[in-house]
Amino acid sequence: MRAARDAWRSDTAPAVDPTRVVFVDETAANTTMDRRYGYAPRGDPVVGSVPHGHYKSLTFTAAVRADGMVATQVLDGPMTGDRFRDYVTSVLVPALRPGDTVVLDNLPCHKSAAVRTAVEAAGCRLVFLPPYSPDLNPIELAFAKLKRLLRSDGHRAVPTLLTFLASVSRVFQPDECAAYIRHCGYGLPHATPSPNRY
């Protein structure tokens, strides 16, 4: 595993154009996501409602590239090989540009021949991260922020959770996505702040 990570850092990552790389992954979201901690004056208990009992899980799939989050989809239930193939052909491929490099982790449903065929037919290249390497995948940083937002907003009903997830790509601005890519070791130059930014 260490050799695969070293090879990725020394060979694969430097060969990838950071402005043309697309990181794809999925994460779970459910109606019980809530803040894990609360604050109250010393000596007073933290008071708040926490969901319990029946809950609904959804799978949120997305792609992060230097100019933002694209190709988002929400599914009821877990990701399967057939569902991922359908996502790639109907959602991801239309968002790709010829010459892009699509990066996936090693989830078995990502490795079907149909996925590779669809990506390559779009004029793109498909590569897989080394095993157990979420630190090399910028979309993991985006998903960490997504989960913080879900916990802080407390979307406890399926309709509000779906509405939030459907519009979440607007939350991730291009400069933020570029920073995620830079943080994970891909050679993206820093943006020059515009004079009117501050």
Image (spheres, rainbow, N blue to C red):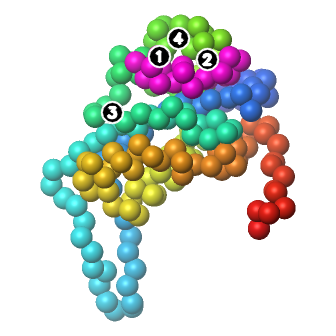
Compared with 89, 155 (above or below) is below
Tell me, for residue 89, which label it has, or none.
Answer: 1
Residue neighbourhood size for the residue with mark 1, other residues' Cα within 10 Å, grouped as few (<14), some (14–19), many (≥20): some
| CB under 8 Å between discs 1 and 2 | no
Which segment did they paint magenta?
A: 86-102
- Is residue 48 in view from this perspective? yes
Q: Secondary structure at mark 3?
A: strand
| CB under 8 Å between discs 1 and 4 | yes
Splitting the image into 4 quarters, where does residue 20 fall? top right
- Residue at (24, 53) in percent of width and height: 157
x then y, percent, for residue 35? 37, 65
Disc with the residue nearer the chain's start (1 vs 4): 1
Report the amino acid beneath label 1: Thr
Tell me, for residue 75, which label it has, or none.
Answer: 3
Q: Quadrant of the N terminus?
A: top right
- Residue at (62, 41) in percent of width and height: 68
Q: Secondary structure at mark 4?
A: helix
- Residue at (78, 39) in percent of width and height: 188
Tell me, for residue 118, which label it has, or none.
Answer: 4
Report the amino acid beneath label 2: Leu
Residue occupied by mark 2 = 126
Report the amino acid beneath label 4: Ala
User: CA gap, disc 4 to disc 2?
Assistant: 10 Å
